[in-house]
Amino acid sequence: MGAVYLLRHGQASFGTADYDVLSPAGQLQAKVLGEELRRRAVPVHAVWSGTLRRQLETASESLAAAGVDLEVRQDARWNEYDHMGLVPEGQSVDPAGSARRFQELLDSALRTWLSSGSAITGSGTWESFSGGAFTALSEVFDGLPSGTSALVFTSAGVIAALCARLLGLPTDGYLALNRTMANASITKVVRGRSGVSLLSFNEHAHFEGDRRELLSYR
């Protein structure tokens, strides 16, 4: 049985001119994530990442801290949906404004995307986005020898889509998973004779205790 660790990227630079870069806190989160992977002695056979800068930076910081010296294979199917492209023109979604208002608009736009079958620039339809992620996951499993693991550095929307599919959750269930995922958290899935199963979701105990100040969700 192989295992895939779905790792959310560290905190991006929300509210700045370039969102797709780790904040100082995000860099520390990525390092702590790597330390947690080292502590667990995960038998890593392969490493994957989306092509977004925040995902690749998280991979670099984490792998160095984990002591894993493997090539990071890039696959755009692990990229997050285009959150700005989701919201209809004319609606204000300035990330530098109210975070709560931003989340309300995003949730509304996500509901429409999930139910309408319409496509957004860079992410396609919901079916192509979530289906592409599941196909990518299957391909990662196909390349894993029994008893080994792969690390995948990706984003909350992708991880939530996979988990919602595995659990058979409706739209609101997907949104709940997506909204509550911590930065640099760990989600573990395995594949055996019965198919792919979710073992853990959104683990972030590595940000408790004296590292509690590093816990973030956006």
Image (cartoon, rainbow, N blue to C red):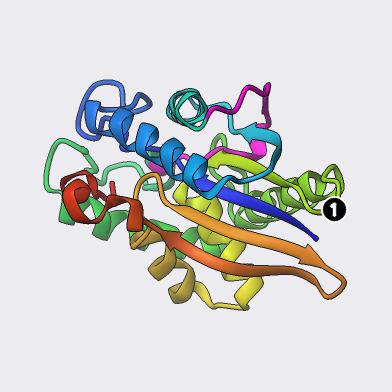
| Residue 123 belongs to magenta span | no
Whole-percent x, y for residue 28 in the image = 29, 31
Question: Residue drawn at (68%, 43%), measured in percent from left and top?
Answer: 43
Residue 163 location (% of width, % of height): 58, 65
Q: Nearer the viewer, residue 93 or 177?
A: 177
Residue 173 visible? The answer is yes
Q: Residue at x 38, y 34 (%)?
A: 30
Using the rendered view, name the quadrant where residue 193 is placed: bottom right
Viewer-side residue, 65 vs 97: 65
Q: Which residues are magenta?
A: 67-83
Q: Which residue is mark 1?
A: 146
Q: Is residue 181 left or right of residue 3?
A: left
Can you say whether 55 is above or below 78 in the image? Answer: above
Q: Residue placed at 34% from the left, 62% from the top?
A: 180
**Is residue 77 inside the magenta stretch?**
yes
Q: Quadrant of the N terminus?
A: bottom right
136 or 3, nearer to the observer? 3
Judge whether 128 appears above or below 122 on screen: below
Query: Where in the figure is residue 190, as x and y percent of width and height?
Result: 71, 62
Extreme residue in the left direction: 98
Q: Label 1 crowding class (10 Å Cα cut-off): few <14, some 14-19, many 20+?
A: few
Residue 35 coordinates in the image, percent (x, y): 42, 38
Three-letter residue code for mark 1: Ser
Could you tell me which secondary element the residue under label 1 belongs to? Answer: loop
Image position of 168 with respect to 207: above or below? below
Q: Is residue 115 visible?
A: no
